[in-house]
């Protein structure tokens, strides 16, 4: 148990559906991240939030919409996805106090299948 | 642009063997390097983190080394066990801010045969 909880664990959706992924951490961390892991590809950073402010958006299509209502919760809203968006979506958090020895803590991920 | 590679892509060893996993990166300007373990369909678990000023870190049967100038890190696993079977990823954290520029390697898939 890393202290980062993601729900749901598995999600199957059609291309016209709207769904949301949820991430929660109670580690007192200030930064939260969404990553995408596709088969045979390295992890891709999608979004970064520091102190609830989005600081990074790595050219992610607008059909992915993040929301960070507070420093403990992070959502990824999904709308009109494509089959190629099927992947494991991972949430992570870090303390982000400027120290060089702080670690990334990951949730267990949401395995998303778009039909 | 930072690029991270890991060799080998897959490795199969008999139980009890010592083994070395390799991670290479192209830009030596890093804050730290972290090694992770990932079980199939699961999230990543942090194993070891080496700061840019350090040469190695140890935890139990694991030892990670860092040579910034040559852009290399190794993860040494002693006396491997079937429970060590997983994918091992290295992640290089760039010089900007905390984890905004972290780049992951593609991973090494390890199988330890009983």
Image (cartoon, coloured by chain):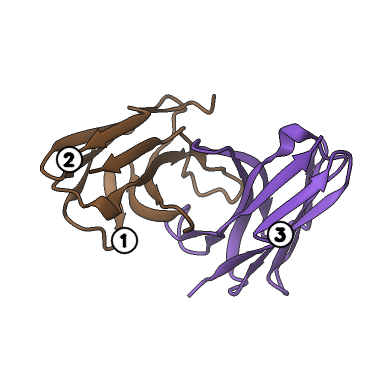
Residue under pointer 1: A58
Residue B60 rendering spot, x and y as whole percentages: 81, 35
Task: Name the subunit of mark 2.
Answer: A
Chain for colour brown: A
Q: From the viewer's perspective, is A54 left or right of A2?
A: left
Residue under pointer 3: B53
* Dot 2: element: loop
Residue A10 rendering spot, x and y as whole percentages: 35, 31
Q: Same subunit under labels 1 and 3?
A: no
Q: From the viewer's perspective, is A57 left or right of A103?
A: left
The color chain B is rendered in: purple
* Dot 1: element: loop
Image quadrant for the C terminus of chain B? top right
- Vertical position of residue A58 compared to residue A78: above or below: below
Q: CA distance from mark 2 to mark 3?
A: 49 Å
Residue at (38% x, 28% y) in the render: A9
Q: Is residue A44 visible?
A: yes
Examine the image and state in which quarter residue B26 appears.
Answer: bottom right
Q: CA distance from mark 1 to mark 2?
A: 25 Å
Q: Earlier in the sequence, mark 1 or mark 2?
A: 2
Residue under pointer 2: A14
Q: CA distance from mark 1 to mark 3?
A: 29 Å
Residue B40 rendering spot, x and y as whole percentages: 54, 38
Q: From the viewer's perspective, is A53 left or right of B100?
A: left
Q: Is residue A23 visible?
A: no
- Vertical position of residue B48 compared to residue A19: above or below: below
């Amino acid at each position: 148990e890393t202290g980062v909880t993601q729900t749901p664990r598995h999600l199957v959706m059609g291309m016209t559906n709207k769904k949301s992924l949820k991430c929660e951490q109670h580690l007192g961390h200030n930064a939260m991240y969404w990553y995408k892991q596709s088969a045979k590809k390295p992890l891709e950073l999608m979004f970064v939030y520091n102190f609830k402010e989005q600081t990074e958006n790595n050219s992610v299509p607008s059909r992915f919409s993040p929301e960070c209502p507070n420093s403990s919760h992070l959502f990824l809203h999904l709308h009109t996805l494509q089959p190629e968006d099927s992947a494991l979506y991972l949430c992570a958090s870090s303390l982000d106090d400027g120290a060089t020895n702080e670690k990334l803590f990951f949730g267990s991920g949401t395995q998303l299948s778009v039909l | 642009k930072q690029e991270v590679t890991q060799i080998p892509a897959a490795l199969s060893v008999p139980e009890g063997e010592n083994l070395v996993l390799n991670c290479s990166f192209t830009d030596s300007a890093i804050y730290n390097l972290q090694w992770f373990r990932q079980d199939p369909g699961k999230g990543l678990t942090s194993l070891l983190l080496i700061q840019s000023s350090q040469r190695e870190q140890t935890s139990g049967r694991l030892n990670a080394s860092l040579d910034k100038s040559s852009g290399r890190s190794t993860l040494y696993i002693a006396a491997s066990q079937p429970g060590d079977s997983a994918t091992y990823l290295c992640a290089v954290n760039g010089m900007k801010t905390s984890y905004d520029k972290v780049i992951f390697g593609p991973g090494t898939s390890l199988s330890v045969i009983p």
